[in-house]
Image: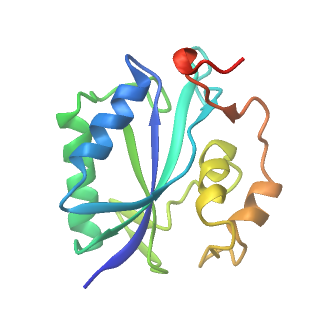
């Protein structure tokens, strides 16, 4: 059975665009991306003494059960070069499971929807591009409503240096 999921991608080390490209290419066949948000450059959150992040949201489909999906995503992060480090610190790639259908799940190693969406503009800004009317099943608010209540200071669309845009 196909399940609709939303993932948040983040990176602030190395070739940031390349990190996204590698991650998106490694998702199939377990996760099939059906839509992607624009990429945003965002200031660090939590631990501030680090480079800016790139963040993107993707809508995808999967046959994997939630626990199998999170195991797959965490294994993929390691295969792509992520190493354990400082909480909210620099990272090569971050693959967060934000939503899985309209499922609410609270296990020791997995909470769905992602428990730290509220108030985090770096997650909500790209997610609102894909699903502004998606309703958070616990908070009862749409992604657009949650974004309107969030601090988006310093979040801007990412324009690659070689894009030719002035």
Residue 92 appearing in the image: no
Quarter where residue 16 is shown = top left
Percent position of residue 54, x then y: 53, 31
Q: In this view, does 89 lie above or below 144?
A: above
Residue at 35% over, 27% down:
18
Q: In this view, does 70 lie above or below 95?
A: below
Instruction: Answer with left or right where residue 7 lies relative to residue 62.
Output: right
Residue at 22% over, 44% down:
76
Along the line of sight, the residue nearer the viewer: 56 or 51: 56
Percent position of residue 143, x then y: 68, 65
Quarter where residue 31 is shown = bottom left
Q: How many labels does the image show?
A: 0
Q: Which residue lies furthest to the bottom in this view?
A: 1
Instruction: Answer with left or right where residue 156 lies relative to residue 49.
Output: right
Residue at 69% over, 45% down:
121
Residue 1 appearing in the image: yes
Colour scheme:
rainbow
Percent position of residue 141, x then y: 73, 73
The C terminus: image quadrant: top right
Instruction: Answer with left or right where residue 147 lies relative to residue 112.
Output: right
Q: Is residue 79 above or below residue 132?
A: above
Instruction: Answer with left or right where residue 46 lies relative to residue 11.
Output: right
Q: Residue furthest front?
A: 164
Along the line of sight, the residue nearer the viewer: 24 or 150: 24
Percent position of residue 126, x then y: 61, 49
Residue at 60% over, 56% down:
127
The N terminus: image quadrant: bottom left
């Amino acid at each position: 059975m196909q399940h609709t999921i939303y993932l948040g991608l983040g990176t602030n080390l190395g070739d940031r665009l390349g990190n996204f490209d590698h991650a998106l290419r490694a998702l199939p066949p377990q996760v099939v991306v059906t839509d992607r948000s624009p990429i945003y450059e965002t200031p660090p959150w939590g631990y501030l003494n680090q480079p800016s992040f790139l963040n993107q949201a993707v809508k995808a489909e999967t046959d994997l059960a939630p626990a199998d999906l999170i195991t797959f995503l965490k294994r993929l992060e390691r295969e792509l070069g992520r190493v354990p480090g400082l909480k909210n610190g620099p990272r090569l790639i971050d693959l967060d499971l934000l939503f899985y259908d309209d499922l609410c799940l609270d296990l020791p190693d997995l909470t769905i929807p992602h428990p730290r969406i509220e108030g985090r503009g770096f997650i909500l800004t790209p997610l609102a591009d894909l699903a502004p009317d998606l309703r958070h099943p616990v908070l009862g608010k749409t992604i657009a409503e949650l974004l309107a209540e969030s601090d988006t200071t310093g979040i801007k669309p990412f324009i690659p240096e070689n894009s030719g845009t002035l």
